[in-house]
Image: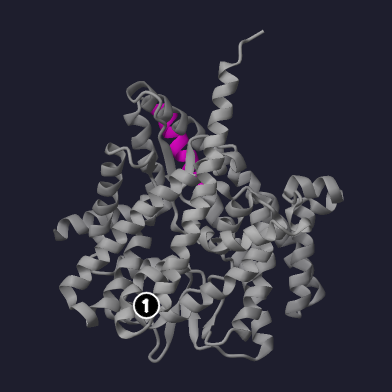
Amino acid sequence: MDFLGVVINYILNLGAPVFVPFIMLLAGLVVRMKFRDAASAAITLGVAFVGMSMLIGFMVDAIGIAAQTMMNRTGLELSIVDGGWTTMANISWAWPYAFAMFPLQVGVNIVMLMLNKTNTFNADLWNVWGKIFTAFIVVSVTTPLFGPVWSLVLAFLVAAFQIIMELNAGDIHQHRIEKLTGIPGVTCTHRMVFFGAIYYPFDLLLRKIPVCNKPMDASALRAKVGVFAENHIIGFILGILFGVIAGYSVAKTLMLGVQASTALVLFPMISKLFMQALSPISEAISDYMNKRFSGRKLFVGIDWPFMGGASEIWFAIIVAIPFTLLWALILPGNKILPFAGIINIALIVPAYLVTRGNTLRMVILSIIGVPFFLFVGTQFAPMITDLGLATKAITIPAGQLISNSSIDAPVFTYAFSFLFKFLEGSFIPLVFALWWGCGYFFYSRELRRESNLAQRQAEQQENVPQA
């Protein structure tokens, strides 16, 4: 068992840029792609992941430091250090039962495919750490209530539920994602999309406001304001504003403007590599499935970066930063200082999907969404710190708490990790679980209705006699 854990951890610790392309290479070979074509697509996918990671790191170094400077100017000190998602991943992998989550995810996916309960093959196996994170929080919460054995059982049951919901989310989002990205047969199975269930009722209200319901994606904005809606101009303007608010010198402000401009120009270029890599593999998988299972399509589920070419995402991410800092200052009970998670992708990607890329509604939803992330980050800090100290995965100074201001799917993760707290009289997690469940039900119904309508229209076009 220890040997299996070592092997699995070694493979997964290779990181997404190596591990995910390796999985896609194997998938390509299984569906009879030529080795040269499968290898080329897999390597291109690895290049795309590395490129996207480099750009995000570049953004954090430039804009994240400016945001930290803004916060420092307020003079407010918050006690919880924001370690970002990388710190959370390291701590999660150090959990003693982490290795068992990998076969659980693969097993659940295979069973659901065989039973025709999903059409999604989740190739995003590197992000299995998200299930590990949920599981160890469940153990931390429920051990005092049920003891170590039953708490571990509950942890893996909750993790299995999360795996099932990720596959379901991949199914229901696929059509909208394909429409937004232009990449066929690919979907997102990252748990961050769960937050769309929280956004959905707010978005329904925003759709009733005329100004919020007008076309406002990148192409529509370019048609209205011309060059001022181009990525390089938007990035430069936002960078300048950040520099001024942070109190930078003229030279540093101009440099920040150019850096932000550079990032927004390069993101769509990197995104094209995802399309170049994923299109041939997804087409080969679809052809393979159609030959063996008449009429059935198989979607490939991966992490969010293939959507990173959307200018709307990066515009909303940058605009959300000052509001994140403002919420950190005024939110009652918040003790986390946003820094490593200040480029909060998990805040924006769900908004992008819910609004179909409407920039104004994305920004409004992100402002509404920030408090959930700060609240959950504060609640999780003691458990994350305890595990970090127990496993020695990271060095934490005595008396210091550590957490993450951008925990993926904060409401889902908090609700189902803390659910059994109602036995101690705490009903907030139960309320959150019901809120998320109701939102997910109606949101998924809209997505399925949209997908079914598109399918019927496509069938009608196929049946139209050719002139």
Determine whether 381 is above or below 56 in the image: below
Q: Which residues are magenta?
A: 34-48
Measuring from the top left, give residue 465's x and y in whole percent: 61, 11
Determine whether 43 is above or below 334 in the image: above
Most frequent secondary structure within the magenta stretch: helix
Residue at figure coordinates x 59%, y 28% from the top left: 457
Tally the numbered discs: 1
Q: Tell whether 225 sits left or right of 154.
A: right
Front residue (pair 240, 304): 304
Residue 25 falls in which quadrant of the image? top left
Q: Tell whether 88 sits left or right of 390.
A: right
Residue occupying the far left of the picture: 1
Q: Tell whether 153 sits left or right of 438.
A: left
Residue at figure coordinates x 57%, y 90% from the top left: 77
Q: Which residue is mark 1?
A: 384
Q: Amino acid at mark 1?
A: Ile
Measuring from the top left, give residue 268's x and y in whole percent: 65, 46
Q: Quadrant of the N terminus?
A: bottom left
Judging from the image, what secondary structure is the residue with disc 1 in?
Answer: helix
Front residue (pair 401, 269): 401
Front residue (pair 296, 260): 296
The crowding category of the residue bearing disc 1, from other C-alpha atoms within 10 Å (few below 14, some 14 to 19, many at least 20), is many
Residue 438 painted magenta = no
Residue at figure coordinates x 70%, y 66% from the top left: 319
Residue 36 painted magenta = yes
Measuring from the top left, give residue 167's x and y in whole percent: 39, 48
Residue 241 visible within the image: yes
Residue 409 visible within the image: no
Measuring from the top left, give residue 204's x and y in whole percent: 63, 58
Front residue (pair 320, 90): 320
Determine whether 277 is above or below 86 in the image: above
